[in-house]
Amino acid sequence: MTTENAKKPSVLFVCVHNAGRSQMAAAFLTTLSAGAIEVRSAGSQPADKVNPAAVQAMSELGIDMSAEIPKVLTTEAVKESDVVITMGCGDECPYFPGKRYEDWVLEDPAGQGVDAVRPIRDEIKTRIEDLIASLIPEAK
């Protein structure tokens, strides 16, 4: 078996609190890419804990986010990522030329129950599947 020296693509998900949308996106990408993509998530103003409704919505699909902790956004995390996907953090995300930036407009699950979080979760899953197909064309 030959090993390729190609660096696997890396993706950073950024939202304000790193407690809902970016955590769900990171969990989906980690699970659905089966380790083929390096995944990071962070927030410009991280919350104390991950949104319990987001944890519950993901657990319904067999993805456990209960041990995740919101992380603060660092310039290094942006520098080390090939793709930076923002979810409502506005201008607080540092910009580096040559990176692929996407802004995903998604409803904020903060303060909402699991019934309101499920459609957000499902939209994120669809976007993650498209992202994987764009980063690893052979995956589809």
Image (cartoon, grey):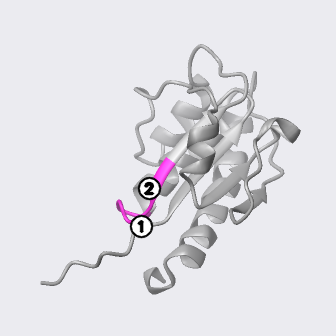
Amino acid at circle 1: Lys
Which region of the structure is painted magenta? 33-39
Left or right of residue 87, residue 3 in this image: left
Task: Please state the horizontal and vertical placement of residue 126, each as a whole percent of the image.
Answer: 64, 64
Secondary structure type for disc 2 = strand
| Mark found first going from the N terminus, 2 or 1 | 1
Q: Nearer the viewer, residue 17 or 28?
A: 17
Q: Farthest residue toward the left?
A: 1
Neighbor class of circle 2 (other Cα within 10 Å; few <14, some 14-19, many 20+) is some
Q: Residue at coordinates 50% horizontally, 56% vertically from top-left?
A: 29
Which quadrant holds residue 138?
bottom left
Amino acid at circle 2: Glu
Residue 40 among those drawn in magenta:
no
Neighbor class of circle 1 (other Cα within 10 Å; few <14, some 14-19, many 20+) is some
Where 119 falls versus 89 (above or below)?
A: below
Where 29 falls versus 48 (above or below)?
A: below
Q: Main secondary structure of the magenta part?
A: loop
Q: Give the residue pinned by disc 2.
A: 38
Q: CA distance from mark 2 to mark 1?
A: 7 Å
Which quadrant holds residue 44?
top right
Picture quarter with the N terminus: bottom left
Q: Nearer the viewer, residue 140 or 73?
A: 73
Q: Residue at coordinates 64% horizontally, 32% vertically from top-left?
A: 73
Q: Give the residue pinned by disc 1.
A: 8
Q: Residue at coordinates 72% horizontally, 47% vertically from top-left?
A: 120
Secondary structure type for disc 1 = loop
